[in-house]
Image (cartoon, grey):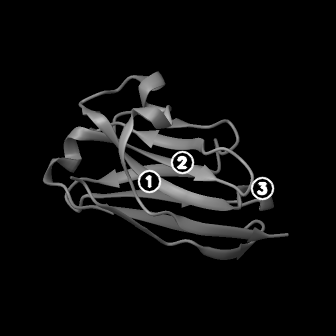
Amino acid sequence: QVQLVESGGGLVQAGGSLRLSCAASRRTFSSVGMGWFRQAPGKDREFVAAITWSATYTYYADSVKGRFTISRDNTKNTVYLQMNRLKPEDTAIYYCAAHRQTYTSDTYYLTQSGEYAYWGQGTQVTVSS
């Protein structure tokens, strides 16, 4: 079992920045890809960003490309999401997730929520206009 705990959400004005963190309990954290997803009220959960187990590759949704950066520190079992130039449409609950397979770098599987086995409880991000 993997426990994921997100932190760093909050209220910020448009144009501002936030940094989300996700701490994992599992010692094998370094062997799995990690992703960030978000869900706005009345909408489906959507992919935001993902990073491979080795941090060699990162993937982003078009809506956040150039503004968000995903990174990881395998020595701390933690993945981060740096969010800059935030917009009101970024308002959502943000979830981190651990991929179900080890050592995968496939773009498709890292961007699909159904491919993730473990999820955090979510952290609210609210961007005011």
The image quarter containing residue 56 is top left
Residue found 62% across the figure and 37% down from its top: 61
Q: Which residue is mark 3?
A: 89
- Of helix, strand and loop, which one carries label 1? strand
Q: Give how far across and how far down residue 16 sits, in percent.
A: 70, 69
- The reply, left or right, for residue 43 in relation to residue 97 is right
- Specify the amino acid type for callout 3: Glu
Q: Earlier in the sequence, mark 3 or mark 1?
A: 3
Q: Earlier in the sequence, mark 1 or mark 2?
A: 2
Name the residue type under label 1: Cys
Judge by depth and name the residue closer to the eye, 102 or 67.
Answer: 102
In front of the other: 18 or 27: 27
Quickly name the residue at label 1. Answer: 96
Q: Position of residue 28 (x, y in %)?
A: 16, 47
User: Is the C-beta separation of discs 1 and 2 under 8 Å?
Assistant: yes
- In three-dimensional space, the C-alpha distance between marks 2 and 3, rounded to whole angstroms, equals 14 Å
Residue designated by label 2: 37
How many C-alpha atoms fall within 10 Å of the one at disc 1: few (<14), some, or many (≥20)? many
